Amino acid sequence: MSRHVTQAVVLVGGEGRRLRPLTDTRPKPMMPLVDRPFVEHQLDHLRRFGVHDVVFSCGYRPDALEAHFGDGAGIGMRIGYVVDPEPLGTAGAVRNAEPLLHGGDVLVLNGDILTDLDLDALLQAHAASGATATIVLTPVDDPSAYGLVRLRVDRAVEEFLEKPTPDQLRPGEPFLINAGTYLLGDAARALIPEGVSCSIERDIFPRLAEQGVLYGFPSDAYWRDIGTPASYLDAHLDVLSGRVATAAPAGEVHVAPGTVVAPDAEVGDLATVGADAQIGPGSVVVRSVVGTACRVGAGAQVRGAILGAGVVVGAGARIGPGVVVGDGAEIAPGAVLEGDVRVPTNGVVDAAGEGVAGAR
Ligand code: GTP
């Protein structure tokens, strides 16, 4: 089997419900991560390993990706697009991309995984095993919330255990879960039916495992699914602190061009502030993500929170850890928000912190 893989399918069709309201206005792959859309980090990673040919398998809000990346020439890649006529699931979305694939082994990436995995090592292991498909696996401390992937000594997948109970675990075995990155050979993709919803994890991998042709590739590389607000915020902290190798600049903070920070404002502790924002006098923005064109008023505090684009935070307001504010929302001066609060897109919160009803 060839170890030369040049093509990737990136699955970007999900609705990103867990990141609402931020994904009301953009698909999850276009959520900014420090200095570029999230999925661009994935493209950078692919390009670093010589993969220049990518198909975005889209569903929810496909236009945003094409408007930004076009045919990929601007970033030295060739990008094609397919769109699910209805949600096709992860396998159906790969099948839908088949007309744009050249044949042979294809890398498949979930469009919400940040990793600096060594793709060359993955390709070598795949070729050496003769697998029809290989799943990248990442270790977790507690597998009870995930699907455990159990391997034989030769790394062939022995079985999948969904949300295993303690009595199902073997002493000393590594807890490996599906990391959302796969290599699928022709024979693996041929198992996917056309035009119907189908899951790689639930429908295709168990069949390949039964045939003994599905292998695992355990990796300790940095890995994070950015699909929840907490994880999305942590991804920023990891990029800025250099825990994961990306093309974005590491540093104490990232403040994008066009943003004005008042001289006595404090922007620190791995905060990211998007372009064209205004950070007012005496305000504090720490360990947070502040979107483009936000305005943080005088004396306001934003700690451990995520603000979408164009959010207005009134003077003296305090936005604490766990809070997610949708695009265009307005927080009144003096309002205090903290905990698992989600302010809807264009929501208005008054000084008493009311008005977040309807937040998701
Ligand atoms: P949540 O709604 O928050 O669960 O997010 P999601 O559905 O976007 O993500 P999930 O983790 O369930 O899916 C993993 C990856 O597959 C994501 O990158 C999704 O964009 C993608 N994906 C999931 N379902 C589909 C689908 O039906 N079609 C396509 N094209 N992509 C999909």
Image: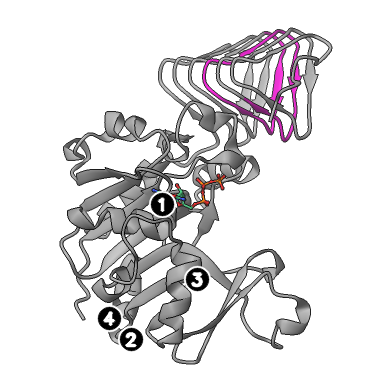
Numbered disc 1: secondary structure: loop
Tell me if 28 is positioned left or right of 54 in this view.
Answer: right
| CA distance for labels 2 and 3 | 16 Å
Which residue shows up at 24% across the image and 72% down it? 186
User: Pointer 3: residues within 10 angstroms few (<14), some, or many (20+)?
Assistant: many
Q: Residue furthest bottom?
A: 153
Cβ(mark 1) to ligand 1 < 8 Å?
A: yes
Which residue shows up at 77% across the image and 9% down it? 350
Residue on which the image places disc 2: 129
The verdict on residue 200 being magenta is: no
Q: Looking at the figure, which quarter contains the C terminus?
A: top right
Q: Which residues are magenta?
A: 298-325
Residue 340 at x, y percent in the picture? 75, 35
Which of the two discs, 2 and 1, labels the residue nearer the N terminus?
1
Residue on which the image places disc 1: 88
Which residue shows up at 26% across the image and 53% down it? 47
Which of the two discs, 3 and 1, labels the residue nearer the N terminus?
1
| CA distance for labels 3 and 1 | 24 Å
Looking at the picture, which amino acid does disc 3 mark? Leu
| CA distance for labels 4 and 2 | 6 Å
| CA distance for labels 2 and 1 | 30 Å
Cβ(mark 3) to ligand 1 < 8 Å?
A: no
